[in-house]
Image (cartoon, grey):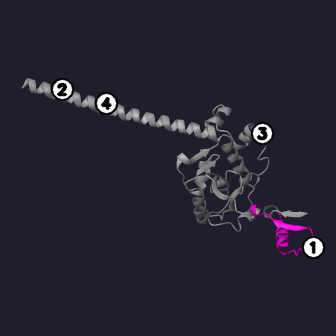
């Protein structure tokens, strides 16, 4: 009989026990620590980012980053950290954000978060829901061609009469899942967002390729039109010169 212990799903007491418990050679029981449970999740071609924010400024209406989570294409958590406040917090928005003062007491400085997140998302497809809001509070940018926003994808918007659907609505309508029934969880939201992308990735990427192809074709049409216009102008100018010479 083997007792299999997953380090990601047990308490620190059990982790310590797994490494220190003496096992007799005559006993049939053997403790195995799965290598797969110890390994760090791998970076994939696409990653999904989600943030929780708190309120600052007048009446707490402005946003400040409080927590950031990133998952890979398998939904495995790559990054999940709380952020050290850079300004006085007026509203923790706990009922929505799930953030309390205690969460941020040992938060990571924003500049460290920015560097770490930049290293993760660089050269990768960045998935998110209303991702511009997350990038704004991170004070980061990402190439538009590498962003996949589940709020703005036409394939999803068409299910909501062209409107901008909430993540909760998308999860319910497309995945049949109920989320955000209480305070939000940025890891869960990132996983749901990634699941939406992965499930519709083929047609999503195809639509982008077709759009790029059409854009390229339109670009060439404009170039040809400008070249033709220049030739006509040149021809017209040449004709006027000939007429003037004939008059002389």
Q: Earlier in the sequence, mark 2 or mark 4?
A: 4
**Picture quarter with the C terminus:** top left
Specify the farthest residue to the right: 27
Q: Could you say which disc has been placed on residue 239 in the image?
A: 2
Badge nearest the viewer, 1 or 4: 1
Left or right: 107 in relation to 242 = right
The residue depicted at 52 percent of the width and 36 percent of the height is: 211
Closer to the camera, 26 or 148?
26
Q: Are marks 1 and 4 in contact (CB under 8 Å)?
A: no
Q: Residue 35's x, y, as percent?
A: 76, 64
The residue wearing badge 3 is 176
Examine the rendered structure and indicate whether residue 153 appears above or below residue 116. Answer: above
Q: Secondary structure at mark 2?
A: helix
Question: Which callout, 1 or 3, points at the residue further toward the start of the chain?
Answer: 1
Q: Which residues are magenta?
A: 10-36
User: Are circles 2 and 4 on residues that touch, CB within 8 Å?
Assistant: no
The structure residue drawn at horizontal position 91% and vertical position 63%, both measured from the top left corner, is 1
- For label 4, the crowd category at 10 Å Cα-Cα, with few meaning under 14, some 14 to 19 and many 20 or more, is few
Percent position (x, y) of residue 65?
A: 64, 58
Q: Secondary structure at mark 4?
A: helix
Which one is earlier in the sequence, the residue at label 3 or at label 2?
A: 3
Q: Quadrant of residue 175?
A: top right
Left or right, 136 with respect to 168, comes to left
Residue 19 among those drawn in magenta? yes
How many dots with numbers?
4
The residue under label 4 is 228
Question: Nearer the N terminus, badge 1 or badge 4?
Answer: 1
Categorize mark 3 by other alpha carbons within 10 Å: few (<14), some (14-19), many (20+). Answer: few
């Amino acid at each position: 009989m083997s007792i299999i212990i997953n380090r990601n799903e047990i308490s620190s007491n059990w982790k310590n026990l797994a490494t220190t418990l003496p096992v007799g050679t005559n006993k049939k029981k053997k403790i195995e620590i799965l290598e797969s449970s110890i390994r760090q999740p791998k970076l994939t071609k696409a990653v999904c980012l989600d943030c929780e924010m708190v309120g600052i400024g007048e009446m707490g209406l402005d946003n400040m980053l409080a927590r950031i989570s990133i998952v890979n294409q398998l939904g495995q958590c790559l990054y999940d950290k709380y952020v050290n406040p850079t300004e006085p917090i007026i509203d923790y928005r706990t009922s929505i954000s799930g953030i309390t003062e205690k969460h941020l007491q040992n938060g990571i400085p924003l500049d460290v978060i920015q560097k770490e997140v930049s290293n993760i998302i660089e050269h990768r497809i960045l998935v998110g829901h209303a991702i511009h809001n997350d990038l704004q509070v991170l004070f980061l940018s990402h190439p538009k061609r590498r962003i996949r926003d589940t709020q703005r994808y036409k394939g999803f918007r068409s299910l909501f009469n062209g409107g901008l659907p909430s993540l909760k609505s998308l999860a319910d309508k497309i995945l049949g899942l109920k989320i955000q029934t209480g305070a939000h969880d940025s890891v869960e939201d990132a996983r749901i967002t990634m699941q939406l992308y992965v499930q519709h990735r083929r047609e999503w990427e195809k639509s982008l390729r077709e759009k790029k192809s059409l854009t390229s074709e339109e670009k060439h049409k404009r170039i040809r039109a400008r070249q033709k216009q220049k030739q006509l102008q040149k021809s017209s100018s040449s004709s006027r010169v000939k007429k003037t010479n004939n008059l002389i």
